[in-house]
Structures are given as C-alpha cells and as structure tokens.
Image (spheres, rainbow, N blue to C red):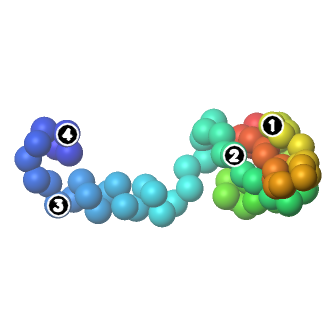
Amino acid sequence: PCGSGKAFAGCHALSEQARAVPARSTASVEAVGATVDQATWRALEVLQLAESQARVEVIEEPSRGLLRRRPARVRAWPL
C-alpha cells in the first residue's frame, strides 16, 4: 500500500489521477479576483459548478489603499 513505505507504482498513478479530476464533495475553494464577481466566477470554475449549485461566502471585499490594492476573496462549496 501507499503508506507502508514500500514502493507501489499504481499508488502514485492513482494519486495523480485524483488531483487531475476535481472531486465533487463538500470541500470548499477560496478564490481571489479584482471584484467579488470575478472571484466568484473563478471559484465556481474550479468546482465546475453553476452558481445555483454552490454556496458562495464573501471573505473580503476588494479595497484600495494608498500603497496597495487588496483583491476580493471568496469561499465557495457545493450545496
């Protein structure tokens, strides 16, 4: 098995496939963008869901300071 310390070629290949295919679970995704809409769109794209299929929480609104800008930050997860 993967965690036994012994090399198992199929184990590495399986983990690569798991990363390549997004899992539809209750896992949340955080995304940033210049606007809340852009950050939401990016999060939904990663989850491969429509807006009606996910819950989106605004973590931080975009802001502008004298020296720097802060992007919008959202968290999204499947319903």
Question: Where is mark 1, residue-wise?
Answer: 59
Question: Where is mark 2, residue-wise?
Answer: 30
Name which residue type carries label 2: Glu
Return the disc, 3 or 2, that comes first in the chain's sequence: 3
Name which residue type carries label 1: Ile
Question: Where is mark 4, residue-wise?
Answer: 3
Q: Secondary structure at mark 1?
A: strand
Q: Say above or below: 14 vs 73.
A: below
CA distance for labels 3 and 1 = 41 Å
For the residues bearing labels 4 and 3, Cβ distance under 8 angstroms? no
Can you tell which of label 4 and label 1 is closer to the viewer? 1
- Residue 11 appears at what percent x and percent y? 24, 54
Return the disc, 2 or 1, that comes first in the chain's sequence: 2
CA distance for labels 4 and 3 = 12 Å
23 and 68: which is toward the camera = 68
Left or right, 54 with respect to 12, comes to right
Name which residue type carries label 4: Gly
- Residue 28 appears at what percent x and percent y? 66, 40
For the residues bearing labels 2 and 1, Cβ distance under 8 angstroms? yes
For the residues bearing labels 3 and 1, Cβ distance under 8 angstroms? no
CA distance for labels 4 and 1 = 36 Å
Return the disc, 4 or 1, that comes first in the chain's sequence: 4
CA distance for labels 2 and 1 = 9 Å
